[in-house]
Amino acid sequence: MPDFKRVIRGYEPEAVDQAWAETDRQLSEANAANKELRLQINNLREQNTEWGNRLKSYETMESDLRDALLSAQRVANQIREEANNNAETLIKSARDESDAITSEANRLAAEKKTEIEADLVEKRHEIIQLQEEIDALIIKKDELQSLVEQSIQHLEIVQNLLRDPSQTQTLFQQEKGS
C-alpha cells in the first residue's frame, strides 16, 4: 500500500497520481512480459514445425534410397557375380546409412518435442503467475479507489461542519443511523 501524506483536504494529489502511475507501469510491464512469452511460444511452435519438416525430408530421402536400392538390385541380377557382390555391399551400406539417418532424425525429433513440451509447461506457469499478479494489482487499485471515495465523503462532512457547527448533532445522528 502506498503511504500518502495527509494534507488539509485529503491525500496529496501528486502522491496519489504517482501511485496510480506506478501501478499502471507495473501493469504495462506485466502485459509486455505476457506478449514476449506469447512470442516465444510461437517461436517454439515454428521450430517444432521446422523439425517436423526435416523429419519428412529424411523420410522422403529414405524412400528414395530404398527405390534406388531396388533398382540397383534389378541391375545387379543381370551382372556377373562380382557385380552382384558389390551391389549387395552397396545395399547394406545404404540401409545402414538410411537407418542411421532415420534413427538420428527420430531421436532429434523426440528431443525437440520433449524440450518444447517442457518449455510450454514452463511458459504456461509463468503466464498463470503473471495473471495472478495482474489480479492482485487490480484488487489493490479497487482498494485505493474505495479509500479515496471514503476520504472524499469524510472531507464533505468536515466541510459541512465547518460551515455550520450547529449541524454537528444532526450529522452524528445521521452517521449513527447509516
Image (cartoon, grey):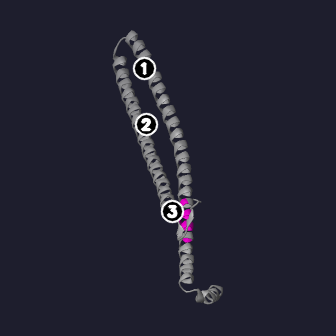
Observer-nearest of 8 and 33: 8
Q: Earlier in the sequence, mark 3 or mark 1?
A: 3
Q: Mark 2 belongs to which amino acid?
A: Trp
Whether 40 is drawn above or below 2: the answer is: above
The residue beneath circle 2 is 51
Within 10 Å of disc 3 (Cα), the crowding (few <14, some 14-19, many 20+) is some
| Residue 120 rendering spot, x and y as whole percentages | 52, 46
**Secondary structure at numbered mark 2:** helix
Residue that appears at 48% across and 64% down? 13
Q: Quadrant of the N terminus?
A: bottom right
Residue bounds of the magenta highlight:
137-146
| Disc 2 to disc 3, C-alpha distance | 53 Å
Whether 55 is drawn above or below 130: the answer is: above
CB contact under 8 Å: marks 1 and 2? no
The residue beneath circle 3 is 16
| Residue 43 rendering spot, x and y as whole percentages | 42, 42
Residue that appears at 34% across and 24% down? 71
The residue beneath circle 1 is 91
Let me know if residue 126 is in the magenta part: no
Whether 113 is drawn above or below 28: the answer is: above
**Residue 150 figure quarter:** bottom right
Q: Main secondary structure of the magenta part?
A: helix
Observer-nearest of 146 and 14: 14
**Secondary structure at numbered mark 1:** helix
**Residue 172 figure quarter:** bottom right
